[in-house]
Amino acid sequence: MALRAALRSRSGLSGLLSQRSSCSSDIRMCVSPLLVPQERNYSTPPKIRVEFDQSTGVAVMHMQSPPVNSLSLDFLTELCISVEKLEMDKSCRGLIITSAQPKVFSAGLDITEMYGKSPEHCGAFWRSVQEMWLKLYGSNMVTIAAINGSSPAGGCLMAMTCDYRIMADNPRYNIGLNETQLGIVAPFW
Ligand SMILES: CCCCCCCCCC/C=C/CC(=O)SCCNC(=O)CCNC(=O)[C@H](O)C(C)(C)COP(=O)(O)OP(=O)(O)OC[C@H]1O[C@@H](n2cnc3c(N)ncnc32)[C@H](O)[C@@H]1OP(=O)(O)O
């Protein structure tokens, strides 16, 4: 009940979704082995910003990777580490994922990760995709995708792994799986 109330409160969804076409502890990190080699590059701004409200137990994760929050290896690694850190904080019971970019929740997998890369990089990339949806789908937190923009393909996958999805009511925003149109076949898991 408290969580539901919290989600309706100022840190909740109404504010996030009202942005239609323009948006304007000490925890020891326990990072999965898959993520260890991918340390954050501190010369670039963070792609994920997390606001955790201790009083409500709800965290809001803002995806802020311009222009379209495409899911690159770096982005996914940062996202997974953020989820893991929140997961370890038992006072965090709810997670809202949303976009800080105008008009786009996430453009899906970063197309530039899919060509001209070494087999090792491709392997790491696809593992990070798998890690992302496993982490969100298996999370103990109540997870909500506040979809405040278009969310094709991998963006849709990310939303689907959450417990709840709420999408801004704007006919310009689309969501769905378009892999067949693109000629991409998701690898066997
Ligand atoms: C629980 C179940 C587990 C099993 C899972 C099985 C299912 C697997 C599904 C997961 C697989 C997913 C595959 C993919 O995700 S492939 C990526 C597919 N994505 C797309 O096709 C989206 C393409 N983009 C768009 O439609 C539009 O860009 C947009 C998101 C609607 C935004 O439109 P807008 O007009 O605002 O912006 P632009 O189109 O001008 O784009 C701005 C710049 O961003 C670059 N861009 C866009 N999308 C991507 C991308 N995906 N990767 C990399 N870069 C991207 C675009 O090129 C522009 O760059 P520029 O300014 O340099 O030109």
Image: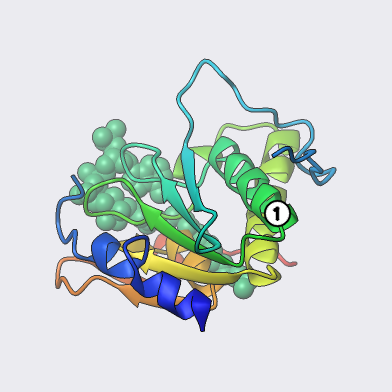
Q: Residue at x 21, y 49 (%)?
A: 23
Q: Residue at x 68, y 68 (%)?
A: 139
Is residue 39 depicted above or below 27 in this figure? above
Quickly name the residue at label 1.
Answer: 89
Taking the image as drawn, is residue 184 in sight?
no
Q: Residue at x 33, y 70 (%)?
A: 175
Left or right: 89 with respect to 97? right
In the depicted view, which residue is nearer to us: 77 or 139? 139
Left or right: 78 with respect to 139? left
Left or right: 28 with respect to 102? right
Looking at the rendered structure, the kind of residue marked 1 is Asp
In the depicted view, which residue is nearer to us: 141 or 1? 1
Q: Residue at x 55, y 62 (%)?
A: 57
Please tell me in which quadrant of the rendered image residue 189 appears. bottom right
**Extreme residue toward the top, this view:** 43
In the depicted view, which residue is nearer to us: 138 or 141? 141
